[in-house]
Image (spheres, coloured by chain):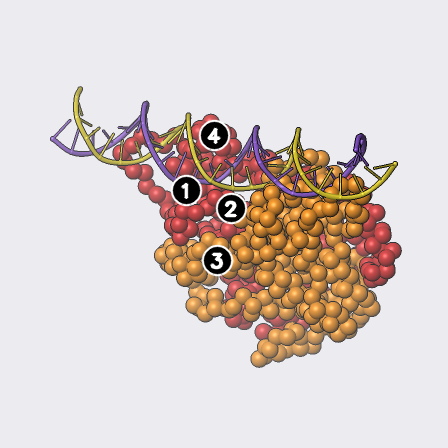
Chain colours: A orange, B red, C purple, D yellow
Amino acid sequence: MTTDPTPAEQLRRSIDLLWGPSERPARGPKPSLTLDRIVEAAIAAADRDGIGALSMRRVAGELGVGAMSLYRYVPGKAELLALMLDRLILPGEDVTQAADKGWRELLEAVARDSYRLYLRHPWLLRVNWTRPVMGPNSLAGVEIVIAGLAGLGLTDQEQIGVVITLDGFVTGFVRQRILYDAAAEETGVSDEEFWSQHHPVLVRAMESGNYPAMAALSAEAYDASWDESFDFGLDRLLDGFAVLFAARRGIPPPGPGETRAEDQGGA
Amino acid sequence: MTTDPTPAEQLRRSIDLLWGPSERPARGPKPSLTLDRIVEAAIAAADRDGIGALSMRRVAGELGVGAMSLYRYVPGKAELLALMLDRLILPGEDVTQAADKGWRELLEAVARDSYRLYLRHPWLLRVNWTRPVMGPNSLAGVEIVIAGLAGLGLTDQEQIGVVITLDGFVTGFVRQRILYDAAAEETGVSDEEFWSQHHPVLVRAMESGNYPAMAALSAEAYDASWDESFDFGLDRLLDGFAVLFAARRGIPPPGPGETRAEDQGGA
DNA sequence: CTAATTTGCGTACGGCGTACCCAAATGTAG
DNA sequence: CTACATTTGGGTACGCCGTACGCAAATTAG
């Protein structure tokens, strides 16, 4: 990362690329590439070989052009990454279909859609580490949620708070999963290798008496799949939202949401 | 990142570094450095100049040695990053003090402690992108939470689920904050610049009619500080946990937790 | 036609992680 | 004490990276 040339100007260019159509100048030769083709090729390369192997030279190579040709279309690598992000981040069909089904179904659809997106392109979370340039697609996602929260008696700040909280949970959770899951493929260390490597020290740690509560857990404690854990966390969070929404309407809060608790104790 | 040399072996070395005391060999000259000093210097450099400027050459320079000397103590940069992480991730005093105050206080303390840690060292989240090598300190944090959840009638899987969910929320939220907050300093683009650059396109977007719900929000909708937003999200999540815990005991769930009626919000 | 302008891109620079190798330092064995 | 085994410090070098610079070829305006 050798990023010097006036970061403010860099930001301005990113915004223009995201929102502006940018008319062709009339004087020179026709461009042989398009911004879309470059972004597409970069996404394909990142999906195939991981973000670590994504370089300007490689993207250029995929397109059969010289490395520096890309700089006629994109100011730098950071801007290309921002474009890749906004290209993929548009809300899926499940979300638009759930838009009028009540807040719980909607938020659940949004969370799952986002979860799936990040799993499909695990490098997305690593890309999104520079200051985000808000593009049209990311705004569209927020719009759907805010629209779905109307009429629940929330303040405007609370509505934004729900958006931030939900997104925080999803990205944080998926980050943990990718940490274990997808990193396995990148590094070539399988899950079995990972745990068998850790096994001796973990056994010694548990037997040391320094972690009594963890040592007391049954072996099945860690058996839940990632998807099950995601559902668990999402249900808890939506339950928490429900408590607030109910309080805003003066209605007593219900019991836990999708949870099939055998000893259900409700209000 | 040129990481090739047998990733499984790399993992094994990381584990040994984290857990093993590694006795000195008796034959050669005494080492002039220690692993601790290297990790410390690396953390200081990352705090000062950001993770982007952290290179092996720089860390070596801080310590007044040649770049390649570091490789006598650490197999590679990835392992150094893992060590930096585990060094910092130990639970703070607030957490150990809250350990016997009931689950809500404890989880709140854990979340806030972790939140503060990540804000103090914003590069931590970017470091933690390779497969995590579980160290003694990260286990200690889990231990405290699991111990605090005992006696609530949760299954073992649910206890782990709470840990994962809480950590997911905290890391996801703090990631969003760092995105806006700390990236500002790194890039040198101030918050005012950022928003003023975006302003024209956002105004145009709102006037386009494509985002009616967002356009209807008042200007104050985005006024909440990050800390207020964090409190909002954390309260919702803990409320959600409370619903489950109450159901597990057959006790009717309470209203919203710390929430002070009308002055709650999101950023 | 000529002039203006834009595109593709070869070359080059400074920085990175780290493989390789060797001299210096330190211990042990005799 | 000497000879040797072993380990440390680190210089050099390689192959990557992002990208600044500048120029020939292509295209259009006048």
**Nearer the observer, A186 or B176:** A186
- Closer to us: mark 3 or mark 2? 3
Kind of residue at badge 4: Leu
Q: What's the mark number on residue B85? A: 2
In primary-sequence order, the first of circles 4 and 1 is: 4
Task: Tell me which chain the residue with mark 3 is part of.
Answer: A
Kind of residue at badge 3: Glu
In this rendering, do the residues under marks 2 and 4 share a single chain? Answer: yes
Q: Quadrant of residue A68?
A: top right
Marks 3/2 in contact by CB < 8 Å: the verdict is no
Q: Which residue is mark 1?
A: B75
- Closer to us: mark 4 or mark 3? 3
Q: What's the mark number on residue A32? A: none
Q: Does B25 sit above or below residue B252? A: above
Image location (x, y in percent) of residue B24: 32, 38
SS category of the residue bearing label 3: helix
